Amino acid sequence: MNPTCENIIKINEELKLLNKLEDIYLTIFKRLKAEYNISELEILLKTIDKTESLFKSSEIIYDDFLNSLKYIENESTQIYFLVYSKTKENNDLIIKELPKLKLALEFYSSSLYNKYLENSIHELSIVDSITGAFNRSYLDVYVDNILSISNREQKKVGFLKVGVDQFKAVIDEFDYTIGDKVLIELTSTLKESVRISDIVIKMSEDEFLVILLNVINENNATIVTDKLINNFSQRKVLIDEDTKQTLKKTICVGMSIFPDDATNIDDAIKKADIALYEARNIGRSKLYKYSEESVNAIDFF
């Protein structure tokens, strides 16, 4: 076999072993930089309805010497490698080695696209299609990670069960489309109001679970919860484009703390659920912290 082909196949096999897309992008960039003296690389994925930038080696890329190479993955999807050179000499080298470069990228694009599809399918399985929040499947997959982080760092974890007040009334008065808008607005509020490391999960039709990692104490979790309640109470959901009618909703939150209130995540979620039930009994925009005393006082039926 031609040594060039052997090397390309060897590198492509290495790409297939990488788990992260970002690692694949960086490996391709480093190989092209080493073999062809390219200065920058941008990788685009183009479908029928959009063009997505998968990788860009630099925020600012000057396109004095640009070679655009397209690879068709299927009838509706193409991957573009935009290869940039700083000098004419380097660009001349790319032109000279273009057949070899095209062959390499043909292999690499296939491995890259397969990993992209794999990641996309995985994300679809753990992300709620309406709100963009994680779904219950995410919790099943990553539950052990949550506990291991807590145990390793000797920090508490806050479990906040969030429910939209009088959500059924929104459906009855308007429709499910408006209901979805409320849920989307709530998801946005929750994500914006917590840290990137915290987790937002859609648990049921109108209930979410916010997991606060590395909580210092109960007071810390309470401050965050008050922030969630207040921030969402200020948000407006557009009901009618023509009349500019808007809707404002509120949430109640039930809180439990691991390991103070529970020995495992299922128990922590159950107790946050009990606390949410009690918060809703009190009124709107309420927070209730789980306690053993509250369990005896709650009548579920």
Image (cartoon, rainbow, N blue to C red):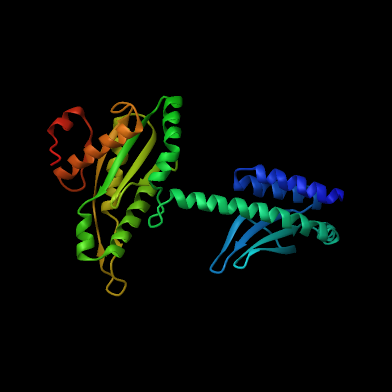
**Residue at the bottom extreme, as displayed:** 242
Q: Residue furthest front?
A: 1
The image shows a total of numbered marks equal to 0
Foreground of the two, 216 or 264 = 264
Where residue 78 sits: x, y (%)? 64, 64
* Left or right relative to 154: residue 46: right
Q: Is residue 198 visible?
A: no
Q: Residue at x 82, y 51 (%)?
A: 5
Residue 275: quarter of image? top left
Residue 232 seen in render: yes
Q: Nearer the viewer, residue 218 or 100?
A: 100
Residue sitting nearer the eye, 277 or 279:
277
- The residue nearer to you, when weighing 155 against 59, is 155
Compared to 33, does 236 lie above or below?
A: below
Whole-percent x, y for residue 136 in the image:
38, 45
Position of 80 relative to 19 (above/below): below
Residue at figure coordinates x 41%, y 45% from the top left = 137
Q: Is residue 87 left or right of residue 20?
A: right
Q: Quadrant of the C terminus?
A: top left
